[in-house]
Image: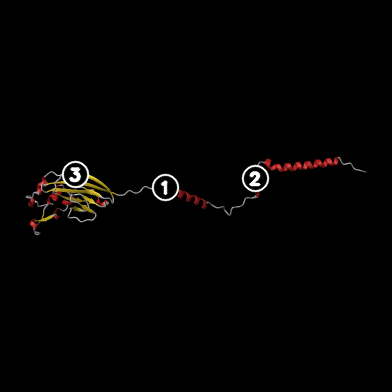
Amino acid sequence: MYSMFWHWSLRDYNSVKDFTDEHTCNINGDPRASIRFLRYNRFFHNCSVEKAIMQPVTVLLSDVEVSEGGRVRLDCQTSLSGADLSFTWLSPNRGFITPNGFNDSLISMFSNGTLEVHAATVNDSGLYLCTAVDARQALNATREVNVTVLSPLAEPFNTGYTTLLASTVTLVLILLYLLLTPCHCRSCKRPTAAYIHSTVSSVFPSSIKDQPKIETLKQVAFIESVISDERTWWIPQG
């Protein structure tokens, strides 16, 4: 555990730098002999774990995208392949995660270092750091996984709804046009006979209007000719 914290301190992680004085341990199990081990590391000079810190650290990077509400698994595959490896995850919103020291129904950690988020949320986005430590060989390695949780996209507007909406709007406009047409004015004066006559005269030609008069004159002339003929052939008797 000290190796992991010291390694994070060398990499200037904020989770360690901001709480340097709060990370303490007890010397020989005595609660009265509590020290800030990140500031006073002389007590660990004889520990074998410091050899692992001085070894080159292999960092593997990867990016993972998952939809909101989906399940995501983050493996802790590093350059180490020993049988006695211990794993620790540092999550952006849940802090440190270990197989035996973490209890959360929404996230699980397996013995091989795999971290599983059952239902990812937007708050689960961020950088996940896994540290694998081989105590026998005094080596460690780190894997960083950048997780991005995607929000569900809005469904595209159906063209059928667009057509239905356009038809409804058109029907409403037609009804408004029919119902709101201005009515005839009651106070308006009715047209006079002279106005009607002038209107008819302008529409119909004069030949059509004068035709009844011509027919009447022809009938009068015909009657007069018959009367004159009868007078010519009449002989008085004495």
Question: What whole-number distance in Å separates the C-alpha atoms at marks 1 and 3?
Answer: 50 Å
Nearest to viewer (mark 3 / mark 2): 3
Circle number at residue 200? 2
Looking at this rendering, what residue extends furthest in the left direction? Answer: 46
Q: Say what secondary structure mark 1 lies in.
A: helix
Which residue is labeled 1 in the image?
A: 160
Q: Quadrant of residue 102?
A: bottom left
Q: Quadrant of the C terminus?
A: top right
Looking at this rendering, what residue extends furthest in the bottom direction? Answer: 32
Circle number at residue 97? none
Q: Say what secondary structure mark 3 lies in.
A: strand
> In the shown orientation, is residue 43 left or right of residue 78?
left
Q: Earlier in the sequence, mark 3 or mark 2?
A: 3
Type of amino acid under label 1: Gly
> In the shown orientation, is residue 89 left or right of residue 137?
right
Disc 3: CA contacts within 10 A as few (<14), some (14-19) or many (>=20) = some
Question: What whole-number distance in Å separates the C-alpha atoms at marks 3 and 2?
Answer: 101 Å
The picture places residue 27, in percent across and down from the top left corner, at 8, 56
The picture places residue 189, in percent across and down from the top left corner, at 61, 52
Which residue is labeled 3 in the image?
A: 60
Question: What whole-number distance in Å separates the C-alpha atoms at marks 1 and 2?
Answer: 55 Å
The picture places residue 19, in percent across and down from the top left corner, at 16, 53
Q: Nearer the viewer, residue 51 or 226?
A: 51
Type of amino acid under label 3: Leu
Badge 1 vs badge 3, beta-carbon distance below 8 Å: no
